[in-house]
Structures are given as C-alpha cells and as structure tokens.
Image (spheres, grey):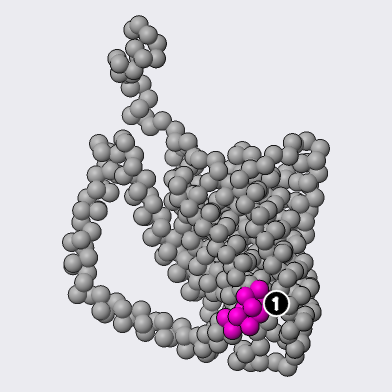
C-alpha cells in the first residue's frame, strides 16, 4: 500500500490543474503528505534506522542549503529595498517539504524490493495517467473543469506543457531502465510499452526542454551502453558486440560523409533557435532575467538573498512587491543561497550522474542528464519528481546492478585449472 500511495502522489502532483483553485496544494501534495506519515510510522515501528550513502548525500545537501538560505535571508532582509514575503514563505514551505520527502525516500527506498515496486508502479500508473490525458485531449474521455490544450500545445492535466514534458521525460527514461533490467521478455515488452504514451505525450507538448532533454539523454544512453558492451568480456562473439565495434569503426566515415551537410544543418538549427528566441520575446526576457540573476548574486557578496524570487526586470514588470525567478535552477539557487548552494547542487547532481554511470545504468544516467536539461530552463528544486529521480539514482549507485548469468554461461564446463584451485583433486 505504501509504495502505491507514493506513486499516486508523484503522478497526481504533476497534474496541477487538479489543485483546489488558487490554493498551491492539490491531491498530489496531500497524497505525498499521507505517504510521509505512513512511511515515518512504519519506520518507527517496524524498521531499523540504517544509514546509506544516498541518505548521507541528501542530508548533507539540505544541511548546506539550509545554512546558506538562512545566511542569505539575513542579508536580503538587510539589503533589499523591498521584500516579497509571500514568495519567501512559499519557498520556505516547499523546501521543508522537499527535505522531508527526499530524506524519507532515501530511507524507505533503500530496500531494493520496495524500490523496484515503486519504479514499476511509476511506469505503469504514470503511463496510464498519460493515456487518460491524451484521451481527454482527443475528446474520447473529457474531464470536467480540465483544459488539456494550451493553444496548440498539449498540457494534459498540468498548468503548462513544460510541466507535462518534465513528467513525461522521467517516465520515458524510467521505462527504458526497467526494460533493461527486466528478467523476462514479457517484462521488457511491458516496460517499453509503458514508455510509448510518455514519449507521445512529451512530443505532443511541443516542449523544447523535453526535446533537448530527450536528445541529450539518448546520446548519454547510447554512449554509456556502448561502453558497457565493450567492457563486457563476453562481448566479442556476440552480435551486439560486433555491431558496437563496427559502429565505432564506421564513425569516422560517417562524420566524413555528413560533413558537407553540416553547414545546412547548423543553419537550420540557427533558424529554429532564432524562432524560439523571438517567440513572444521569451529569448530576450530570459537573457534579461539571467543577467539580473548574476548581478543579484554578485551584489549579495556571493551569499544570496534567501528563499523566494528576487528579480524585477521582467518585460511585464509589476510594481513592488512582485518579483520573479530566473527560470534557471543554478541562477535561482545563486540568488537565494549564493555560490556555496550552487556548489552543493552541482555536487549532488554530479554524484547521481557519475554513480549510475559507473554501475552500468545508462538509462538512469540519461535520466539525470534530462533532469539537468530541464534545470537550465526551469526551477526544479521544488518538484517532487526531480527528487524522485535524483534519490533513485543515488540509491542505485550505492547498490550496483548484478547481471544475471547469460544463457551462454549457464552449463559451461569449469576449466580444469580452476577446479583444481577450488576443490583440490578433480
């Protein structure tokens, strides 16, 4: 029951149109609070408290964030000409909830069985929810009070298409990882099938962050998967090993063949980037916000101004006390907690990425890469789905995947020398 409550909370949290009016809490947040209570009660009554590397890293990150945010708030209250108290309160509550959520996840999901259950339920329930949202958008299953379209962009039950794209990217890459770890062909097919609605929903959202994140995640997956196959001692006689070797040998030839088309490809990318930049002036707005964020961080003496937004130069600037965020996680963290908080964010993200890459989990490495792409255009530290991905990768990095013996290895006779070393006489 407890893993199901966690899964439902994560899935419904992404459906922000289901919230209660203007109140920033909805069914998803309430389910996560219920999961926190149940998991804490179970931990106190039934389970011993055991430390693990993921828990240590998450706790250290939030300790650093807490200290830097407190110092920054003192500076902000003393220096800033006016204060956005509702934004400060919102971020403080959100950080407290994410602290409790990520810590409890690192404790509860340290059990490999429960972690696997949550991953599979996330894949299945998340895929079903996206199927229902697509059906709603196409008119097959309308939901009262929900508008699944933002102009020509699909947003499902979320407030904006980028929220949907963020959730869809996590489900897509989680399904890819489950397909790799599945012990049976039916499990592989089920995992890949669950990834199809997520991929379709992400593409229908027309989210640039989703497309860029998917491309980078795919590149990371292919690169690390090739490395895993090359390092496999049983690779040489297999079809996949030959394919990897031939692909690497053909790479210089492919680059030479593609060179004449590179200039046109770059011009096409430049045209597309310029179109996105000019769309509603969002490119100039983002650059102004990012520039001001850097200026604010430096103005604070590199310690930040505490929780809450601190920028005022948006194109549709409002009178005080309205302030805005940079929509870039690194820069928003810089304006709130300074350079030390930025270092902590980079550290925990790098630990998750390098950890799963070293343990041979290319799909999860792609997941971290996708999360970081979204962090370049959105503020993700308040998103439960972001912490689900980071904590999951940290836990998997501390529990390396043990590959099951291949059919070729099963029943293979033990060499004579090895039998003599192990058992003495043959």
Residue nearest the viewer, comparing 166 with 294 = 294
Say which quarter of the image contains residue 305: bottom right
On screen, residue 140 versus residue 322, left or right, reads left
* Residue 43 appears in view: yes
Please give the name of the residue rendered at 77% of the width and 59% of the height, measured from the top-left corner: 30
Which residue: 33% across, 80% down? 268
Label 1 secondary element: loop
Residue at horizontal 55 percent and vertical 40 percent from the top: 399
Task: Determine whether, in the image, residue 18 is placed left or right of residue 154.
Answer: right
Is residue 239 toward the left or the right of residue 215 in the image? left
Viewer-side residue, 276 vs 349: 349
The stretch drawn in magenta includes residue 297: yes
Location of the N terminus by quadrant is top right
Range of residues picked out in magenta: 293-304
Q: Position of residue 368 (x, y in %)?
A: 51, 58
**Residue farthest to the top, as pictured:** 425
Looking at the picture, tell me which residue is in the foreground, 66 or 201: 66
Label 1 Cα neighbours within 10 Å, binned few <14 / some 14-19 / many ≥20: many
Q: Is residue 132 above or below residue 331?
A: above
Residue 318: x percent and y percent? 70, 92
Q: Quadrant of the C terminus?
A: top left
From the image, tell me which residue sits under label 1: 305
Provide residue 362's location: percent of width, then percent of height. Answer: 44, 51
- Residue occupying the point 34% across, 12% down: 420
């Amino acid at each position: 029951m407890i893993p199901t409550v966690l899964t439902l909370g994560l899935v419904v949290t992404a459906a922000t149109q289901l919230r209660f009016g203007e109140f920033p809490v909805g069914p998803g947040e309430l389910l996560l609070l219920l999961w926190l209570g149940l998991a804490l009660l179970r931990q106190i009554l039934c389970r011993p408290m055991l430390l693990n590397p993921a828990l240590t890293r998450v706790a250290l990150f939030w300790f650093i964030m807490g200290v830097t945010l407190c110092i920054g708030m003192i500076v902000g209250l003393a220096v800033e000409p006016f204060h956005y108290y509702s934004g400060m309160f919102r971020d403080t509550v959100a950080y407290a909830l994410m602290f409790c959520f990520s810590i409890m996840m690192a404790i509860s999901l340290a059990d490999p069985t429960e972690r696997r259950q949550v991953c599979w339920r996330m894949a299945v329930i998340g895929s079903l929810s996206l199927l229902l949202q697509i059906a709603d958008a196409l008119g097959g299953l309308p939901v009262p009070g929900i508008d699944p379209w933002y102009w020509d962009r699909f947003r499902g039950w979320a407030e904006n298409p980028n929220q949907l794209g963020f959730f869809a990217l996590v489900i897509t890459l989680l399904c890819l990882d489950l397909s790799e770890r599945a012990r049976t062909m039916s499990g592989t097919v089920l995992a890949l099938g669950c990834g199809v609605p997520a991929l379709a929903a992400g593409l229908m959202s027309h989210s640039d962050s989703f497309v860029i994140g998917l491309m980078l995640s795919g590149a990371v997956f292919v690169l690390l998967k090739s490395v895993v196959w090359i390092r496999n001692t049983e690779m040489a006689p297999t079809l996949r090993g030959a394919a990897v070797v031939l692909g690497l040998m053909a790479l210089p030839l492919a680059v030479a063949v593609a060179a004449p088309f590179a200039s046109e490809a770059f011009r096409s990318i430049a045209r597309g980037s310029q179109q996105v930049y000019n769309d509603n002036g969002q490119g100039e707005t983002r650059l102004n916000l990012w520039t001001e964020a850097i200026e604010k961080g430096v103005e604070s003496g590199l310690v930040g101004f505490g929780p809450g937004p601190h920028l005022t130069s948006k194109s549709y600037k409002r009178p005080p006390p309205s302030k805005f965020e940079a929509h870039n996680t690194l820069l928003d963290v810089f304006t709130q907690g300074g350079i030390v908080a930025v270092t902590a964010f980079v550290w925990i993200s790098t630990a998750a990425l390098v950890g799963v890459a070293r343990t041979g989990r290319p799909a999860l490495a792609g997941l971290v890469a996708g999360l970081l792409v979204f962090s370049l255009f959105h503020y993700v530290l308040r998103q439960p789905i972001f912490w689900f991905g980071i904590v999951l990768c940290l836990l998997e990095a501390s529990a390396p995947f043990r590959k099951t013996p291949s059919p070729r290895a099963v029943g293979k006779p033990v060499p004579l020398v090895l039998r003599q070393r192990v058992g003495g006489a043959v």
